[in-house]
Image (cartoon, coloured by chain):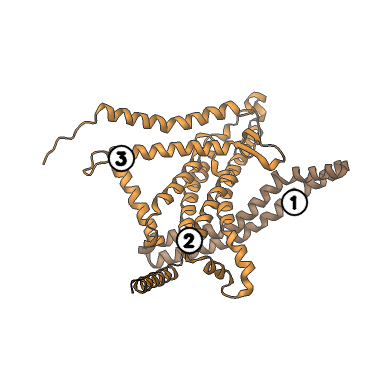
Amino acid sequence: MELAIGIILGCCALGAGIAMIAGIGPGIGEGNAVAKACEAIGRQPESKGAVTTTMIMGCAIAETTGLYALVIAILLIFVAPQQFVNVLTKAMGK
Amino acid sequence: MNEEIKKPSFKFKLVDAFYIIMMILPLAFGLVLDALTTPPSSGVNIAGARIYHEINLGGSRFFNIIISEAQVNSILVLITIFFVFLYLTHGLKEKIELKRQHLAEIIVQKVDGLVGENMGSDFSGFPPFIIAIMALSAFSSLVSLLGLYPATSDMNVVTGWAILVFIIITYYKLKCGPLYYLNGFTKPVFILAPINFISEFATPVSMAFRHYGNVMSGGVISVLLSTFLAWLSALVLGWAGDYVASIPIFQVGLPAIFSVYFDIFSGCLQAFIFAMLTMLNISGAFDSEEYYRRKKLKEEKKKLKNINGGI
């Protein structure tokens, strides 16, 4: 029983860590977006306001995939272990 | 020309004082409630909203009505915002007498401009809704500066707003008739209908996750940082005895700098982004060309009917 609970906790932590690998994608994407925005502002300094607003909107949307991963990681750390242990104890009780 | 500026009457001042008190009172109430119900604990404490009260309507867990910290805080923020705006608009005159009227006019102009720019002329009634969502989101996040639990870092609150936005989006999609709405799923190819159906529901989910994830990750990082600093100061001051080592001296200063980003900047930015996405999604859902074409057709039909009826 202890071993099973240990495996559940360990795998939940591992899963959370693996889920956060998704953070690479938004990092690269947002970096690209900001780099292009800097270029655009360098070329046309008068359009700074519009470019900045659009860039922030784009960054927010590009961030979404990373935030999905974050939410899954948080669920795996704080919610999932309890649920899984409950399922296990129910199964063992039968 | 040089008109005498009237001093505000006693009654005016009294109403002002009432508004200011009502602005502060909900937040003070929240702080007191927070202080009374916080269990004494130490160390890392990352948890969801505390549950104040649970009403069971019988049956399974599904029928429980839960009154949590996030709900209470969001309603307190709601009351505060209500009285802030009442205060700002109190004593409006055509000839500006009070400084606060400038602020109120700037807010109204900015939001009108933003909505007009992003949504077009079909949505001239939307600025109040947009500013309401923006203010509620921003104030709910900024409440964490007072040490209260920010309502936006509870997923239920943000999901509620996202569902509201989703209902408005669907309403505007249905304006051209239900058949046109259903037909929209089969574009550009019929096979893509299931994927279009899923992406329809992805909009509120992604809006809720984005807002919740940003605010909550800021809170988690703040807690982790302050815990790390406490550990570091215990490590460095360990030679001076247990009592000195228990004082987290490194916690002074650095968390405040991070808080400027995670609480103030991120909170306001997320409010802006949520409002912006609301505007773009709603205006994108409304097919104005089709709507006006149908309206014209209907009017022509009506005219024909009237002429026929007249004869």
Residue B246 is situated, as x and y percent measured from the top left of the image, at: 64, 28
Q: Is residue A26 visible?
A: no
The quadrant of the picture occupied by the N terminus of chain B is top left
* Label 1 secondary element: helix
Chain ID at mark 1: A
Which of the 4 image quadrants contains residue B232?
top right
The residues bearing labels 1 and 2 have C-alpha atoms spaced at a distance of: 44 Å
Q: How many marks?
A: 3
Q: Nearer the viewer, mark 1 or mark 3?
A: 3
Q: In terms of depth relative to the viewer, which is nearer, B18 or A33? A: B18
Residues at marks 1 and 3, common chain?
no
Q: In terms of depth relative to the viewer, which is nearer, B183 or A54? A: B183
Chain ID at mark 3: B
Label 2 packing within 10 angstroms: few (<14), some (14-19), many (20+):
some
**CB contact under 8 Å: marks 1 and 3:** no
Residue most extreme to the left: B1
**CB contact under 8 Å: marks 2 and 3:** no
Residue pictured at 61% horizontal, 61% vertical: A25
Q: In terms of depth relative to the viewer, which is nearer, A35 or B262? A: B262
Q: Is residue B140 left or right of residue B205?
A: left
Residue A26 is situated, as x and y percent measured from the top left of the image, at: 59, 59
Q: Colour of chain A?
A: brown
- Amino acid type at circle 1 is Leu
From the image, tell me which residue sits under label 2.
B172
The residues bearing labels 1 and 3 have C-alpha atoms spaced at a distance of: 54 Å
Residues at marks 1 and 2, common chain?
no
Q: Colour of chain B?
A: orange
Residues at marks 2 and 3, common chain?
yes
From the image, tell me which residue sits under label 3.
B100
* Label 3 secondary element: helix
